[in-house]
Image: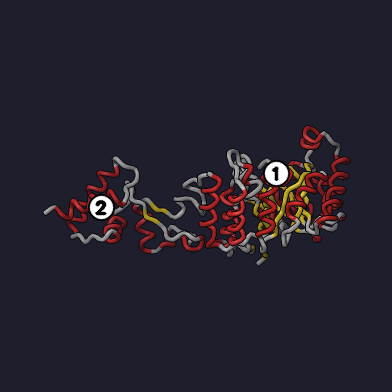
Amino acid sequence: MTQIKIFDTTLRDGEQSPGVNLNQLEKLEIAKQLERLGVDVMEAGFPASSQGDFDAVQKIAQTITKSTVAALARANKNDIDRAWEAIKDAKKPRIHVFIATSPIHMQDKLKKSPEEVVLIAEEMVRYAKEKCTDVEFSAEDASRSELPFLAEIIEKVIAQGATVVNLPDTVGYTTPKEYGEMFKYMKEHVPNINKVDLSTHCHDDLGMALANSIAGVQNGATQVEGTINGIGERAGNVALEELAVTFEIRKDFYSFTTNFILNEIKRTSDIISKLTGMVVPGNKAIVGRNAFAHESGIHQDGVLKNAQTYEIITPALVGVTSNSLVLGKHSGRHAFKDKIVQLGFELSEDKVTEAFQNFKLLTDRKKEVTDDDLFVILMDIQTDV
Ligand code: KIV
Ligand code: ZN
């Protein structure tokens, strides 16, 4: 098994989700839970962006002891100074410097030539390295950059002391094959590539962030960046819980593992959802309300006989107390009888039949029948002589 490092950026890229704004206490609360979850690195924020973010990053750096604490900086001295000031008290600090490398970003956003971008990247990685031994370099929009240029800039920042090189799919544009090939190319064309951790950073604009991250890992990446619940700019980042659980559940197929304490996943997801106000969709993989819920009679019958018929993940693995059989119009008599017992009723077969008919009538009017609804039906039947 190859150990993949997890770089969580919930507190930076995740906080860039439109409408999300965390205060210092909220960020600290999340940071502590991320540490419990076992993230190797947490990106605490972007200190140059505001005094509030600087203070929050500093507080996190002074509190967290097990995970590396990273701070983001654009490739300029002021950002790097602010980042270092904020994280210098951390037990394991990392400065994360980025600059764009794609033709469209260099030309239209930075208004710099590729040669100028290389010089800035070299100079700023050297500058960051004078302050901090752990320096990550990100080539923003790497997936739309020209491969020979990317190889050149990577070799040069490694020569300046970068310890991690990140190749983001900033706009969620790439495909697994393409993204994997980019990592393979760097492995083959950058002479000193094995001196650094190579990292993925995938956005989910086309819904391929997980597949792309896995393709990166299969082609030599040793670090994956993402967020919990997949929050982040636009369609968000790769959901780290999906990656960690995929590696666990399909260890017969993939030979990768992470340091995630898997049964802390649900708690982490809940805390982040509550504090960011970003509701987790019911059908979200691993952490959605319906991820372990079964509604159809056929599925409920199967699960009652052997949970593995319709469950590939044991709820307890990710910290969910139990699966749930949701009673609705597709539910069958088997799950209904099970629920009667759970609610403490003992009914004859005739009464069960009558109660089941009343329940089915109700399901035509109500999408989900609650325990309270059932209680009324069952009380009626039980007291009816
Ligand atoms: O998506 C991106 O390119 C980023 C960088 C700042 C790493 O978030
Ligand atoms: Zn990003």
In terms of sequence position, does the residue under pointer 1 or pointer 2 come before the other?
Answer: 1
Say which element carries label 2.
Answer: helix
Q: Which residue is drawn at 34% across and 46% down?
A: 368
Q: How many marks?
A: 2
Find disc 1 in the rendering and name its residue.
51
Position of residue 17 in the picture relative to residue 362 (left or right):
right
Query: Of the numbered discs in the image, which one, if any, rests on residue 375?
Result: 2
In the image, residue 63 sits, relative to residue 117, either above or below, namely below
- Judge the density around disc 2: few (<14), some (14-19), many (≥20) Cα neighbours within 10 Å: some
Packing grade of label 1 (10 A; few <14, some 14-19, many >=20) is few
Q: As drawn, which residue projects farthest toward the top?
A: 108
Q: Position of residue 281 (x, y in %)?
A: 49, 45
Q: Where is residue 9 in the image (x, y as percent from the top left)?
A: 65, 51
* Closer to us: 314 or 17: 17
**Is 312 located above or below residue 176 in the figure?**
below
In screen coordinates, is 143 left or right of 277? right
Q: Nearer the viewer, residue 232 or 222?
A: 232
Rendered residue at 23%/50% (across/down): 376
**Could you tell me which residue is drawn at 47 percent across and 59 percent down?**
320
Query: Residue 24, position in %: x, y?
Result: 62, 49
Q: In which quarter of the image is residue 187?
A: bottom right
Decide: marks 1, 2 in contact (CB < 8 A)? no
- Residue displayed at 45% across by 59% down: 311
Q: Indicate the quadrant containing the C terminus: top left, top right, bottom left or bottom right.
A: bottom left
Name which quarter of the figure residue 346 lies in.
bottom left
Residue 22: x and y in percent read: 60, 45
Give the alpha-carbon distance from disc 1 to disc 2, as whole Å. Answer: 55 Å
Label placed on residue 197: none
- Residue 206 visible in rendering: no
**Ligand 1, what quadrant?**
top right
